[in-house]
Amino acid sequence: HSATRMDFSNEYNANSIHAQGDAWFIERVQELTDGEVDITLHTGGALGFRSSDHFYGVADNAVQIADSLSGALAGIDPIFLLSSLPFVVEDVDSAHRLYEIARPEYDKVFEDNDQILLYASPWPASGIWSEDPVTSMEALENLKIRSYDRNGTETLMNAGASPVRLSWADVVPQLATGGIEAVLTSAEAGANASFWEHLSDFNAIQYAIPLNMVHMNRDAFSDLSEAEQQAVLQAARETDARNWDIVKQRLEENYAELGDHQVEIHDPVPADFQAGLEQAAQPVVESWVDDTGERGRRILKEFRQESDQ
Amino acid sequence: MEMLLVGAGVIGLLFGILALGSWVFAGLVIVAMLSLWGFGDFDPSRIGLILSKILFRAANSWELSAIPLFILMGELIFRSDISERLFRGLTPLTRYLPGGILHTNVLGCTLFAAVSGSSAATTATIGKITTRELAERRYDRSLSIGSLAGAGSLGLLIPPSIVMIVYGVQAEVSISQLFMAGVLPGLLIAALYIGYVAVRSLIDPDLAPRAEDAGQGAWRALQDLAPVLGLIVIVIGAIYSGIATPSEAAAVGCAATLGLLLWERQLTLGLFLEALRGALVSAVMVCSLLVAAALLSTAMGYLHLPSELAGWIAEQAFSPLALLLALALFYVLLGLFLDGISITVMSLPITLPIIIQAGYDPLWFGVFLVIMVELGQITPPVGFNLFVLQGLTGESIGRVALAAAPFFMLMCIAALIISLWPMIVLWLPAVLSG
Amino acid sequence: MASRSPEGAVPHGALARAVAALGRFSGGLATLGAGLAMLLVVYMLGHILLEIGLRLVGRSTFILDEYIGYSVAAMTFLGLPYALEQGGLIRVALVLERLPRAWRWPLELIVSLTALLSFGWLARYWTLAVQRSHDRGIVSETLAQTPLWIPQGAVLVGLYLLCLVLVVRSLRILVQRHAFISGER
Ligand code: NA
Ligand code: NA
């Protein structure tokens, strides 16, 4: 009999940290099943789907597997905003811990919608790319900065900045012409788009470490043989571990690249600036807890208890 | 090779269904469904699920808003005396150039390309202004339509450009540098077109009857050109001063045109509503085609057609030159029935690594790819510039495609020239970014 | 709108009148859709200009790309039935033009029915998606948290209207046969 063929949708380019993790997963599945499960990765949104289409796309088996930006699924369930909550996690390790605490809740949402969560793919931490150092609340005052989601817009407004919503395609043209002065994103994303042509500083405010989720249609999973199912789950576990490792290495590589292009890196930023930002983020986190109810409160409580120990 | 058969099958289906007389947008949707069903063994309910989601996703696009707004700008200009004055002003200026005001197409599209990021919007806007005026002055129809089709696609090569942004994001090449790299090749193509029109008109003066010159002076000519030039300066100025993004330029252009008409006391509610109605029909035609093309692209993605064809090229161990030729053929082939952005997104994961491996600069390849995509705009059965011109002139698609054929060849020559002298692409970005 | 053809095959009778009435009804709805679509074009123009103005003073509506995206989608589908009726949607008509008049109508019927079938099929599955968005209260992931069924529903209405126009067109072809004049280029 012939191999089972599946399609895997991803909206990032082939060199992105997410696509590379997905390609690694596909290869592991291939090895573990002797080529019996043949998955094709479609990068750059080549199938026509964006992250926000993936949740029901996978639920309906329009596509069997997808890699989706967690925050893009927030309109379906606010739990997906957890990983992009501002200033909740400090570093990759604490983000990993928060993910493990929340994983049962993530699993449940996917299970309730005919799919299974395979693994997570964390982003490098978001910071502020800017033309001058942004290392104090004063520097943030009226700064025209592009934010990538609802949480970021609210937090930056609370902090006195002037956040702007722009599509990613408009960001570089707007930087080139001075329409915006700064961008809230990772060192990685800025490096991929050659931000150093227009900006000179990266301020590592450790805003958040957002997650991408890789999820699979449950029927497509159940149709596999028992051994193939185990192989997929094993590959998923390995990819999860690999992704959390890689994201740490990426930061070092990104910083080296930024150095090569004379970008000044401010890491860490002054403690009073960090405190001011966290204060601006407080209402955002509280309103998220209100939206998610008991689940959110419990996850954050458990996370903070562990952090204090 | 199975994929070649599938590819041939899809093209055959497309020709068949379009030849039957189906509306093009419906034909693309039908072919997308039949391909998934026939070549991919998808059951009909899954086809409905997938394609209905893509229908909304493809239409729900902020970048597409430039299309109705630029077309509205063209309709407003068309319905005022600005377009007529443009021709009056150009007549003395092109007096010594064989072909006369036939050059308005190429000149107008080149200028407008600096304002608009899409070729459909460029062709529709300039075509709306020029086709009637040129027909009234008895200029050769085929040369007029062909030069519009060819020059309209410059919207993609001369910055700003939507395809370049997509390429830059995918290939991680600086979008600013890509924009700079497109300028000289764009001007090169414009020059080739102007040369061709001039030579054809020299050989056969009947193609471009000498416009009766009112004998007005240069000053008067400049006054007649002022409105159009002013509009273009305002829009380009808004983009390069950072006031508006390239996606917002269309709204600035519309507002400036409305302001100008108000100033000249030509704006009436009737004129505005007529322009709006005309713009709606054209915009719906273009947008529905883009959505339908997205459905076809999705179907091709599920059939793994572009990626397997590109993968096959990757396996052939071509020499760098042969590789380039193979890729050019590959892109022209895909360009027959897919739109440019889809081609770029679906093929790049495979073609980019092999092109870099072969020693080509990704910045240079971006410009080469944009030219390949522009070629696809003027080849049947699915060529957006051809569709726009069919809508504008009422000529059959075959006639429009035939008129565009020489300009297709000229664009191929331009691709050859930048392959032989890559500095034409790389020089400006190198100089400007120091 | 019964058409008179040189062959003198003027359709008559109750059936023809019913189809004509249905045609006026669907035509009216298509015009209404086009009116809404035109309003959306004006809205897009206004919102983008507002955003540009606000950005100059360091402010934003924060929903520009989201709402313009919805507007483009709604404009396209609400305007589609009208553009089709007006003959604004291009077709190739290679074979059609070469056929004798009397032979055209079966081909026209096939064209209308295949389009109806494919868009009807898409409308059916899109209905399920819109229903789900509505029933589960799915909102956009933006600051506006827009209930998604609203923009999705606008597209759905356009799809239904397109199907209605295609049904009426098919009926007209069946009733008028070789007297049918497509009105398209
Ligand atoms: Na352009
Ligand atoms: Na083409």
Image: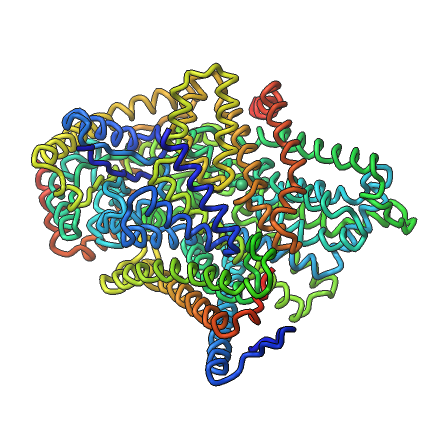
Q: Nearer the viewer, residue B363 or B16?
A: B16
Q: Residue at x 72, y 50 (%)?
A: B228
- Image quadrant of residue A268? top left
Q: Residue at x 7, y 36 (%)?
A: A226
In-image side of A33 versus B143 (left or right): left
Q: Residue at x 16, y 50 (%)?
A: A114
- Which quadrant of the figure contains the N terminus of chain A? top left
Using the image, determine if residue A63 lies above or below residue C62: above
Residue C41 in sight in this render: yes
Residue A280 in sight in this render: no
Q: How many marks?
A: 0
Residue B368: x, y in percent? 54, 28
In-image side of A264 versus C96 (left or right): left
Q: Nearer the viewer, residue B299 or B3?
A: B3
Q: Nearer the viewer, residue A106 or C91?
A: C91
Residue B360: x, y in percent? 49, 19
Residue B336: x, y in percent? 51, 39
In-image side of B112 versus A123 (left or right): right
Residue A299: x, y in percent? 12, 46
In-image side of C56 versus A274 (left or right): right
- The single residue placed furthest to the bottom in the displayed view is C14
